Image (cartoon, rainbow, N blue to C red):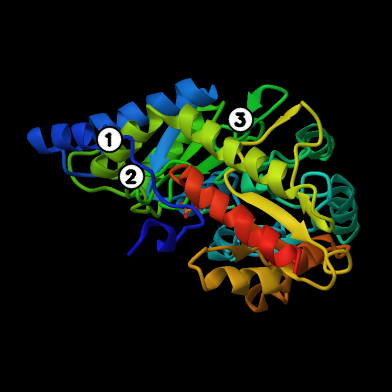
């Protein structure tokens, strides 16, 4: 195979080379279990990087959201407001608890939860006699949501916020890291995210109590006793010390990974931004700093001479360039169709016309150029 015919991935793992050092240490001391020096070390690395006061590393971002809901007392029949334009893992844990997701559509500036629709939803739920127990707020593709307005509404109605910062590790709003605004924040280190532990996640909070309780629940809720004594239902959600070793190697280079993802974004925007009908998800002002985990754009067929995102996705498949439609909103998913939703068509429209471009931090200059050339080729036909 020649270099130019190799598959270009949407978002692939990118090792620093130091991961094995931490894994070897774990093997040398037989620390092959879901606790240990790498887990503690990774928690400290995350705290130092994000400014979060407390951190508990877990098996996944999904398990972190699940524990956050449990810690806020979300139970059967409770309502939880949730961004609709997201990956299903933001909403699934609401249903694990037997609670009811109430979906909120996006605004067009950041593509994240609309403050107006959030307030409309809260007022309407209150008028129906039910106060939502929590808000799950997503920062999509790394772009911080309108945190000033959203947090103000959450505070006004005294509803705690869980920030789903799975895609936005290292993104900031007014210089403060996403994940540290809400009552709790969660990160994901799945294989496709900006850094990875192969699979893993973390819960962060300003409140020590939340992270301590998350650790307790994540390790089967053992009471302090010489025997196995339980007064709560527990979970096996702790991160493995081997996976955490990968994470420690990744945290050494996280700033470089963010720089490269941003560089990808600016490269694509420079070369494709001028094409009629193409618009990029962009930081609305300098208050926003996106890690640009994925470069995402909208392709308006009304302005491209009829070329749709699906035309582009399929045309890219042949030469082995992986692209993907934007997330299909949760209120449009068959599994969530029965739940309440406050929508205005924004996420639905973005799904119809939006595409994610290859955005790995280990993409080569040559591969990135191929993506640009293919796109220009298609758009000027
Ligand atoms: C990846 C992702 C999650 C889930 O994280 P896992 O570590 O894969 O469980 C949750 N929310 C969003 C928005 C994600 O992209």
Q: Is residue 212 visible?
A: no
Q: Residues within 10 Å of mark 3 (few under 14, many from 20)?
A: many
Residue at which label 2 appears: 239
Q: Is residue 296 visible?
A: yes
Q: Is residue 83 left or right of residue 210?
A: right
Q: Which mark is residue 180?
A: 3
What is the CA distance from the residue labelled 2 to the residue labelled 1?
21 Å
At a point 90% along the width and 48% down the height, the residue shown is: 116
Q: Which mark is residue 375?
A: none
Residue 126: percent from left, percent from top = 86, 54
Residue 29: percent from left, percent from top = 9, 33
Which of marks 2 and 3 precedes in the sequence?
Answer: 3
Q: Is residue 166 left or right of residue 146?
A: left
What is the CA distance from the residue labelled 1 to the residue labelled 3?
29 Å
Residue 310: percent from left, percent from top = 68, 73
Which of marks 1 and 2 precedes in the sequence?
Answer: 1
Residue at which label 1 appears: 17
């Amino acid at each position: 195979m020649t270099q130019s015919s190799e598959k270009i991935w949407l978002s692939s793992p990118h090792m620093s080379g130091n991961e094995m050092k931490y894994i070897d240490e774990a093997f040398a001391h037989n620390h092959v279990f879901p606790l240990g020096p790498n887990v503690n070390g990774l928690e400290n690395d995350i705290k130092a990087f994000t400014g979060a006061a407390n951190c508990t590393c877990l098996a996944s971002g999904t398990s972190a959201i699940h524990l956050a809901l449990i810690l806020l007392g979300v139970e059967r029949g409770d309502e939880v407001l949730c961004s609709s334009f997201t990956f299903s893992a933001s909403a699934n844990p609401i249903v694990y608890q037997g609670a009811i997701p109430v979906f909120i559509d996006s605004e067009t500036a950041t593509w994240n939860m609309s403050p107006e629709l959030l307030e409309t939803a809260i007022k309407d739920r209150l008028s129906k006699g039910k106060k939502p127990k929590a808000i799950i707020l997503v920062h999509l593709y790394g772009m911080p949501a309108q945190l000033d307005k959203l947090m103000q509404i959450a505070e006004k109605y005294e509803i705690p916020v869980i920030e789903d910062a799975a895609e936005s590790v290292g993104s900031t709003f007014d210089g403060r890291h996403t994940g540290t605004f809400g009552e709790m924040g969660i990160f994901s280190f799945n294989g496709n995210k900006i850094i990875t532990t192969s699979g893993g996640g973390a819960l962060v909070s300003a409140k020590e109590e939340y992270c301590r309780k998350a650790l307790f629940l994540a390790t089967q809720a053992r009471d302090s006793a010489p025997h196995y004594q339980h007064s709560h239902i527990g979970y096996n959600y702790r991160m493995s010390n081997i996976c955490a070793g990968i994470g420690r190697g990744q945290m050494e280079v996280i700033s470089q990974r963010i720089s490269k993802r941003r560089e990808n974004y600016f490269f694509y925007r420079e070369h494709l931004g001028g094409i009629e009908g193409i618009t990029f998800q962009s930081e609305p002002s300098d208050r926003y700093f996106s890690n640009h985990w994925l470069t995402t754009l909208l392709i308006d067929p009304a302005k491209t001479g009829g070329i749709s995102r699906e035309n582009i996705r399929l045309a890219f498949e042949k030469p082995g360039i992986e692209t993907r439609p934007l997330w299909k909103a949760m209120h449009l998913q068959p599994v969530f169709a029965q739940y309440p939703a406050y929508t205005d068509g924004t996420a639905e429209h973005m799904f119809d016309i939006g595409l994610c471009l290859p955005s790995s931090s280990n993409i080569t200059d040559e591969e990135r150029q191929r993506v640009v050339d293919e796109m220009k080729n298609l758009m000027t036909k």
